[in-house]
């Protein structure tokens, strides 16, 4: 226990120290560094103590944005880096003023995640304080010590990003405990997001291809929202997630090597009547220390196992905790490998050319 605490503190220290120095050079991925500033853009400096890797190295925090090369494919031919509990930021104080006793899953803000290329956000939404909040729960109820912030804060960050980046498409996957009438509709309206919503009527629900990415951009339908509450598709026009996606087991069950079972709410992974595939790869209890290891070789393994389980389909969403933590290429590399295969049939998107050949 003491050893674990020490590892945690060391990890935290190494991450924190990166912000306080101003040495600037441009080291490449894998090179030894002291602080973040030493590394090229898209990289940061970290160790992976969980893999006994004590040498701080420049490691990836950003996947290659697929739209930088190929924009004309159906949306289901792309893969996106996705953060699990995107809002549950390390060190966050609840907007109620309370300390947060709930676990945290990420290190940076939604805006920072967006700037690093995260395009899928898993958000837990609850009725709280006469509003909709991002929260964790005991039995579906939000408490001050598990309440992070009003959902509108985070939705506004996404709104600003969509406003400023008119070729980007973002997906929000809601674990939905909101029961107040039209609660989601109200908060999405208040955040100015309604105009970006991709309509449910255009979502293929029998295994067909999605509209192309560039078509979604032309029509300005650049926000996909899925809810876990089945009833809201009829009552609010918000897509019921498992009508359109298959998803593997989350938590420890999703980390087991060699298997990729569906979560209970999802159809079997192999069900091709759902055109989108979600792969979760994070433990029951988020762990800053272990995340670098879990986001590396074992994540790539999981994706390949799930590819087979899903009837040879690569995941469209790759969801992890602490997405910036890795021992090597991490989650950004997993997204590049997936986009390489999906878009060009090469094993890494880095090799993929605009004409979809591998070079
Ligand atoms: C919870 O936070 C609210 C402010 O959002 C405060 O008014 C209330 O007193 C707090 N409740 C407890 C039990 O601390």
Image (cartoon, helix red, strand yellow):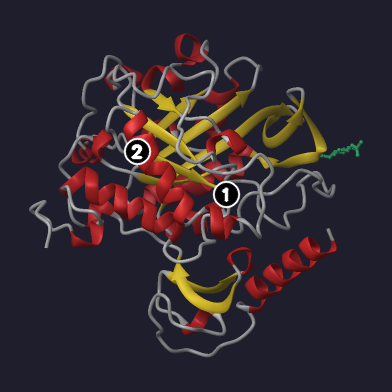
Q: Is residue 32 above or below residue 66?
A: below
Numbered tag placed on residue 100 in the rendering: none
Location of residue 236 in the rendering, given as x and y in whole percent from the top left corner: 48, 15
Residue at 47% across, 57% down: 296
Judge from the rendering whether residue 209 lies leftward or rightward of residue 111; answer left or right. left
Q: In the rendered image, which residue does mark 2 sit on?
A: 316
Q: Is residue 321 above or below residue 309?
A: below
Location of residue 218 in the rendering, given as x and y in whole percent from the top left corner: 20, 39
- How many C-alpha atoms fall within 10 Å of the one at disc 2: few (<14), some, or many (≥20)? many
Q: Secondary structure at mark 2?
A: loop
Q: Is residue 188 visible?
A: yes
69 or 311, which lies in front? 311
CA gap, disc 1 and disc 2: 17 Å
Location of residue 85 in the rendering, given as x and y in whole percent from the top left corner: 60, 42
| Residue that extends furthest to the front in the rendered view of this protein | 258
> Mark 1 CB in 8 Å range of ligand 1?
no
Numbered tag placed on residue 321 in the rendering: 1
Judge from the rendering whether residue 18 lies leftward or rightward of residue 299; answer left or right. right
236 or 317, which lies in front? 317
Can you tell which quarter of the image residue 12 is in?
bottom right
């Amino acid at each position: 226990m003491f050893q674990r605490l020490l590892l945690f503190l060391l990890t935290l220290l190494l991450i924190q120290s990166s912000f306080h120095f101003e040495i600037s050079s441009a080291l490449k991925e894998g090179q030894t560094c002291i602080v973040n500033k030493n590394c090229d853009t898209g990289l940061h400096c970290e160790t992976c103590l969980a893999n006994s890797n004590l040498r701080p190295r420049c490691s990836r925090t950003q996947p290659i944005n697929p739209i930088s090369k190929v924009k004309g494919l159906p949306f289901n031919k792309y893969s996106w880096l996705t953060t699990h509990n995107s809002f549950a930021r390390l060190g966050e104080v609840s907007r109620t003023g309370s300390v947060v006793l709930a676990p945290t899953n990420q290190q940076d803000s939604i805006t920072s995640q967006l700037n690093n290329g995260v395009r899928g956000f898993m958000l837990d939404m609850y009725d709280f304080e006469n509003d909709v909040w991002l929260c964790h729960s005991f039995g579906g109820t939000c408490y001050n010590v598990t309440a992070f912030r009003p959902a509108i804060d985070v939705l506004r960050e996404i709104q600003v990003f969509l406003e400023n980046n008119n070729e980007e498409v973002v997906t929000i996957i809601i674990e939905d405990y909101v029961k107040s009438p039209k609660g989601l509709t109200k908060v999405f309206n208040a955040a100015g997001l309604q105009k970006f919503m991709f309509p449910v009527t255009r979502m293929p629900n029998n295994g067909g291809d999605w509209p192309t990415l560039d078509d979604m951009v032309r029509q300005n339908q650049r926000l996909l929202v899925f809810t876990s509450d089945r009833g809201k598709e009829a009552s609010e026009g918000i897509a019921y997630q498992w009508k359109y996606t298959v998803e593997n087991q989350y938590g420890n069950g999703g980390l087991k090597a060699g298997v990729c079972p569906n979560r209970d709410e999802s159809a079997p992974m192999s069900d091709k009547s759902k055109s989108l595939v979600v792969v979760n790869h994070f433990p029951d209890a988020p762990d800053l220390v272990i995340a670098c290891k879990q986001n590396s070789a074992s994540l790539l393994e999981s994706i390949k196992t799930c590819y087979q389980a899903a009837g040879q389909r690569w995941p469209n969403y790759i969801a992890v905790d602490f997405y910036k933590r890795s021992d090597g290429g991490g989650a950004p590399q997993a997204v590049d490998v997936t986009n390489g295969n999906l878009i060009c049939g090469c094993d890494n998107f880095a090799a993929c050319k605009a004409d979809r050949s591998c070079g």
